[in-house]
Amino acid sequence: MNEEKDFESAMKRLEQIVQMLENGNLPLEESLKVFEEGMKLVKFCSSKLEEAERKVSILVQESNGEYVQMPFSEKEDEIE
């Protein structure tokens, strides 16, 4: 796998790999090679997304009108 420096280039390469595999024109050995590269890219992208999620926070207005910083939550009902 080429050493990907950022999320966007990793995603672009992953899209190329998916297209190559969907076409079905690669020999088995090459398909396995690009599949393995794709799995490494998925892991890299997932790691970057998890890292970004940890950094995300939202401002919530409390009943007294003040804003407080709360950690990001995947559950929308917790924000209300």
Image (tube, grey):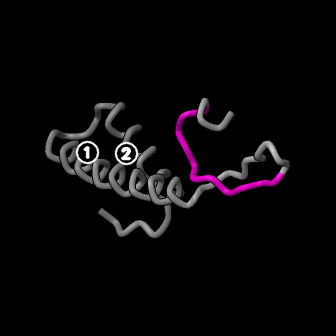
Q: Which residue is mark 2?
A: 17
Left or right position of 71 against 18: right
Q: Which residue is mark 1?
A: 35
Q: Determine the secondary structure under disc 1.
A: helix
Residue 35: x %, y % from top left:
25, 45
Looking at the image, residue 38 lies above or below residue 25: below
Q: Determine the secondary structure under disc 2.
A: helix
Residue at (67, 57) in percent of width and height: 69
Which residues fall within the magenta stretch? Answer: 66-76
**Foreground of the two, 21 or 9:** 9
Rate crowding at label 2 as few (under 14), some (14 to 19) or many (20 or more) other CA atoms within 10 Å: some
Q: Residue furthest left?
A: 29
Q: Earlier in the sequence, mark 1 or mark 2?
A: 2
Tell me the kind of residue under disc 2: Ile
Quadrant (top left, top right, bottom left, bottom right) of the C terminus: top right
Confirm or deny contact between disc 1 and disc 2 (CB under 8 A): yes
